[in-house]
Amino acid sequence: MEIIIFVGIIISLYTSYFYFRYFTRPNPLPGPFPLPFIGTLFQIGLNPRKWAEKNLNESIDIWEYYIGPFRVVTICNAKYLDKIYLSYKESKNLSRESKFFKRNIAAYDEIGILKGLIFNNVFHKWKRSRQFVTKVLMSKIYHYGFINNVQKIFKEFEENWDENKEVTLDFSTWVSCYKTQITIGTIFGQQLYNLPSFKIISKASSEHMALLAFLVFVPKCVSSIIMLLGFNTMKKKSVFLNGTVHNIIQKRRKEIENGSPTNFNLLDLLLTSNLLNESENIKGEESLNDEEVENNLAEITSTSIETTSSALCFLIYNVAKNSSVIEKIRAEILKVFGSDTNAIITYETLESCRYIEAVAKETLRFANPVPYNLRILDGKESVGEFNWPSGTWFWIDHHRIMNDPNHFNEPKKFNPDRFLNEEYEGAGEFNKIRKNGYVPFGGGLRICPGRNIVLIELKLLTVLFFRKYNINLVNENESIKYVYRGINQVYNLKIRLSEK
Ligand code: HEM
């Protein structure tokens, strides 16, 4: 009985404190009314925009919701991003000046993501992982190898298709299988590492992304209850693959210690981080331990598979619906590659595909697979006309920002021409877009390190598909189906593929 009274008093005190803070908060904004402990979880669920679309006037460009005790300010206008996405061009001392370096999670770090890259809030540790990831993903050697790998793997798939005149396939399933093969080959360096089937890995990646979304949104008090019901087994089932990734790391570490030459891939670079020369290494940093290597690899693998697969689905869907876009793509392919539908595609030829690049960019504006970003304020700062206390969470709605009618003509229209200059018969609209008005990859210190490789891959697959195949949607009048689980994951996208 005494325990019940004690718990009752604690809950009442917490509730009073919660509402005292709520009613005295600075800059009250529109948003759902929060409850203690769970915040606005019931109203918002895992997708804030759905609530906003139903309940808020379109002109509202800043609003708020709660994840447990944390107030989350949602930003829907580029004008608020100047400080959040402060870039190296604008500040020579960005690492010190940026107060928006951090991201957070609301729940327990059950799977150790704080030790990876995406959610790492310890600056020097983040920087250490980031330098290896950037070194691989942004380098030309990687891009050249990547382009060759994609063509090789695409050919293997083509061999199956060529046997039939017309193939009907679920593109969303095909693309994650294709993307898993590419990722394992280019991130781990070898495909022969005793991995489970590609289907298992792609499923695990999708669950890993969902788990990240869950950890961000679900407050500690709720996740602890779920943990009691078996949540702590999720790590094993996620992209860590029941210890397979751990075994790969240990095996490769032993091989390198026994003198095996290293290759230019993320696994080898992370494992030999301590062998970098003085100028490349961060002073005083130890090499990464197996757990850190594992977390970095798991994150890059799942992010790479999930984001690009969805982007490719959105691209195929939107292009297949626009015959004039297909015509322009084919005209460019003919101009750049000639009529040989098996011609080798190189980095340089891909670079000259201006229209196809515009298609890729418009896809990421029109239907970005990563519709939101999260940053936490560290120290007091003003954002727009408001002053905010340290610890405020900012939820940046990239989708709304990139569909703002004040910055884009007819934003609800899929129109790659907006990304072309007048000299390429485009509208030149892109040059007039406000700073931070086009942010598919975020911005500033933590901008996506995969941005170059994403554009390369979207362009490459566009050429590979449209130079040789007719692509029709099986359900032409249906909207594309997707669900938000950390990213917009597309499912059940049926296409008919036939040789031209
Ligand atoms: C269409 C594809 C993609 C989109 C739209 C996308 C978008 C984003 C966004 C919005 C962020 C947050 C950036 C910020 O805080 O400013 C991000 C971060 C990140 N992305 Fe991507 N991304 C994509 C593909 C990839 C790929 C292919 C990889 C890896 C191979 C990757 C790796 C990462 C990593 C590691 C981070 C965290 C960076 C950090 O916190 O320092 N992304 N991405």
Image (spheres, helix red, strand yellow):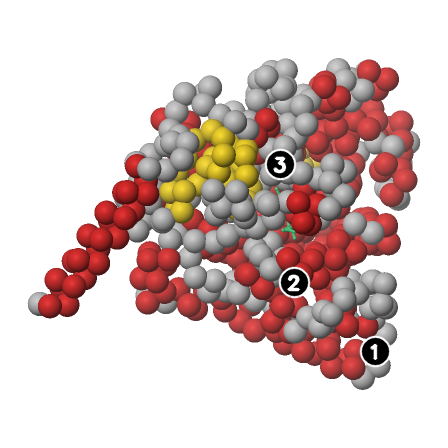
Some atom of ligand 1 lies within 8 Å of the CB belonging to the residue at label 3: no
Give the residue drawn at x 13%, y 64%.
Answer: 4
Residue 437 visible within the image: yes
Instruction: Say which of 80 and 209 sits in front.
Output: 80
Residue 457 visible within the image: no
| Residue 175 in the image, given as x and y percentages of width and height | 64, 47
Tag 1 residue: 260
Q: Amino acid at mark 2?
A: Lys
Tag 2 residue: 125
Cα gap from disc 2 to disc 1, whole angstroms: 27 Å
Question: Which of the two discs, 3 and 2, labels the residue nearer the N terminus?
Answer: 3
Kind of element beneath mark 2: helix
Q: Which residue occupies the extreme bottom position in the image?
A: 258
Tag 3 residue: 83
Instruction: Say which of 314 and 292 sits in front.
Output: 292
| Residue 131 in the image, given as x and y percentages of width and height | 74, 57
Q: Nearer the viewer, mark 2 or mark 1?
A: 2
Give the residue drawn at x 48%, y 38%.
Answer: 388
Does residue 296 lie above or below 316 as drawn? below
Q: Is residue 31 left or right of residue 468?
A: left
Give the residue drawn at x 70%, y 45%.
Answer: 94
Question: Which of the two discs, 3 and 1, labels the residue nearer the N terminus?
Answer: 3
Q: Amino acid at mark 3?
A: Lys
Instruction: Say which of 16 and 365 sits in front.
Output: 16
* Crowding at mark 1 (Cα within 10 Å: few <14, some 14-19, many 20+): few
Question: Which of the two discs, 2 and 1, labels the residue nearer the N terminus?
Answer: 2
